[in-house]
Image (spheres, helix red, strand yellow):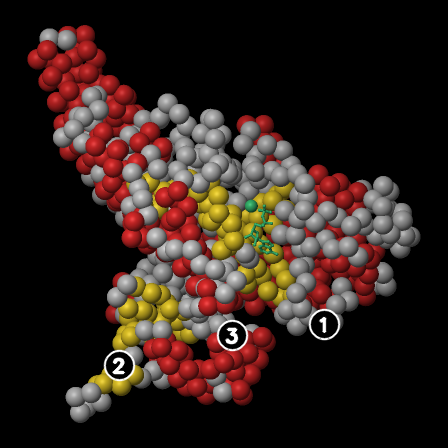
Amino acid sequence: MTHSRQRNVSAARWSADDVALGIDDLTRPQNQVFGVDVFSPAVQRQRLPKDVYKRLQRTLERGEALDVTLADAVASAMRDWALEKGASHYTHWFQPLTGSTAEKHDSFFGPTGDGGAIAEFSGKELIQGEPDASSFPSGGIRATFEARGYTAWDPTSPAFILENPNGALLCIPTAFTSWTGEALDTKIPLLRSMDVLSRSAIRALRLLGDEDPQRVFTTIGAEQEYFLIDEQYYYERPDLQITGRTLFGSQPPKGHELDDHYFGAIPERVLAYMMDTERQLQRLGVPVKTRHNEVAPGQYELAPLFETSNVAADHQHLVMQVLEQTAPKYGLVCLLHEKPFAGVNGSGKHNNWSMGTDLGGNLLDPGDTPHSNLVFLFFCSAVIKAVNEHQGLLRATAANVGQDHRLGANEAPPAIMSIFLGSELEAVFDAIEAGEGDPSAPGSFLGLGTPVLPPLPRHSGDRNRTSPFAFTGNKFEFRALGSSQSLGLTNTVLNTIAAEAIDALADELEKKLDAGTELAAGVTEVTSETYKANKRVVFGGDGYSQEWADEAAERGLLNLRNTPDALPEIVTPKSIALFEKYEVLSEREVEARYEVLLEQYGVKLNIEAETAAHIARTLILPAAVSQLKVLQETGLDAQAAETKGLVDEFYERVLKLEELNRKPGEFSDMEHVRFQRDEVIPAMDAVRETADRLERIIADDLWPLPHYSEMLFIK
Ligand code: ADP
Ligand code: MG
């Protein structure tokens, strides 16, 4: 099979042919596609009876429970709109604990009894669905004999239409619960955490003298990194198909050392793909904004504008889905795995996070008035406290089998949770902590300019790419999330720990105000005390360095390098108490999540190990043996001996891996999972190490897998 040159040539050739979307005059309204497939507030206003629309909006603005009498009217308008768009079916679209989305399609059409059919869709069908829940992971919440689960409409995330060349589907974002009312998904806890944060933040704002905001929303802008490779390579790599990453592959002579990829010109085929993807996402109301090449060859990034957390989380799933589904149209495959290629930069998902009021204010924006500075200082200190106190929990939300190749493996960002404030802001906190200046005496903040605080720079100039949690002007950027991960759990945790810290600071401030302290002085004192108690988590240096690991250990910060180490942080008494206190997750719901995450890790690791053994035996070993035979027959003794040595070593290592793979155990059992981590992974690495050496000496036409240099550089 001398297929390698052939396939490389065909992979390198691409022309738009019949997939071209064409170019439109964007000044013409009919060519504006943003949100056209969304049952948006604008569409609702047009289609719903006036009073229904108003009642619905009121419900949403106040975050109140939905009045069921509204549902019939909304359902009927939604159905008509969907039918006009060609949707024959609808689905309750939800996010089970699998980490991805789920859908079960039902037709709008029901028989009339006289041989005809009419389109029906009632309020009840809009509000509630009953998918068979038995096949979704529940972490023990739901025994199989209680298979019932319910989906419940989330009116805060607008319904949308997914198009297919052969029809369309109305998708209704829903929450997913067991029949006992426990959350089986990632949306419910996120919504609960948003409520919790809103309550705490509003209470704090009142103390800070802000009477106007009624609700605080958390916001997320999630930057998505991904790889694209030609699909021919993908289908020749069982490891990529089955595990999402290459289990073998020797390093190419050229990596990203030349730094010629980051922000470089985007190859034509890739750009065509990006434009197609973005157009679809825009139709779905996802505010995609930025595209560029990423650091690694073959790696790219897409970033939307920020939105309210639960909408952003839903949209993030759409982003991943559209990225993956569009690639084949361009002969590509989109890899969302955190580490598709060893030795090459991995992919993350930067979670930009902030808190904003219903009046449009951003609580993490330093602003330019003394008052907005006070608000900022208060909330920023709360975030510092939250991250310091729950660093382990936050770290655990970024743990999965792919992430173990990034966090804690000398790649960005490190597994140690620390906060980067930027030198200017750090200087401000240091000054406040040192008690410099007196807020009641204007101008007394030494060297800090204005009466209370300087107008802080909106966009702090310095950047620190090595920090997992960085302040970037008016938001924090949590960079530890992996490219394949859902935003749900991380943001549930972020919101809840922030709420707890806000409450703690508000308690302190309240005491001071009651004792007669002036507001500005009170906030300064609370800021100073909070910063002093939590500043060990603030770090502005190189997060990759060994010095930081050492220093972090001295500061008492956690360094949980892998998933089995990190996940138990979810179920510590402290974490459970936090979730229970705020009613974001019950103890059972917390434990369920831990169990599901642990099992996913174990199962995925096992799939990798089995796949590695299989490829080693059925693809690589035969290739090596063929090479050996040729060398022996040709009488090239020295070369034959070299190859034989490697073949023998390889065989031994494969046997060892196979033996370990046979060891029985439960993937939800921590002891077995630790065995996988400590024994199976090293055995896999050993097999790979020999395989990668074989790859460098075996004839190209005998080697059964596409090389890194081909997959990464032929575009
Ligand atoms: P940079 O990372 O270079 O600072 P941007 O400032 O454009 O780039 O922001 C990156 C991401 O952060 C975008 O998705 C953006 O929408 C998001 N973002 C900006 N402001 C906020 C905010 N208040 N809350 C959450 N995300 C935000
Ligand atoms: Mg960024």
Identify the disc placed on residue 109: 2
* 464 with respect to 97 (left or right): right
- The nearer-to-camera label among 2 and 1 is 2
- Up the image or down, 514 lies above or below 270; here it is below
- Residue at disc 1, secondary structure: loop
| Residue matched to label 3 | 41
Q: CA distance from mark 3 to mark 2?
A: 26 Å
Q: Quadrant of the C terminus?
A: top left
Q: Residue at x 85, y 60 (%)?
A: 517
- Residue at disc 2, secondary structure: strand
Given residues 623 and 671, the one toward you in this image is 623
Residue 323: in sight, yes or no? yes
The residue carrying pointer 2 sits among few (fewer than 14), some (14 to 19) or many (20 or more) residues within 10 Å by Cα, namely some
Q: Quadrant of the N terminus?
A: top left
Q: CA distance from mark 2 to mark 1?
A: 48 Å
- The nearer-to-camera label among 1 and 3 is 3
Chain-order first, disc 2 or disc 1: 2
* 495 with respect to 620 (left or right): right
Q: CA distance from mark 1 to mark 3?
A: 24 Å
| Residue matched to label 1 | 212
Q: Residue furthest bottom?
A: 114
Given residues 16 and 445, the one toward you in this image is 16
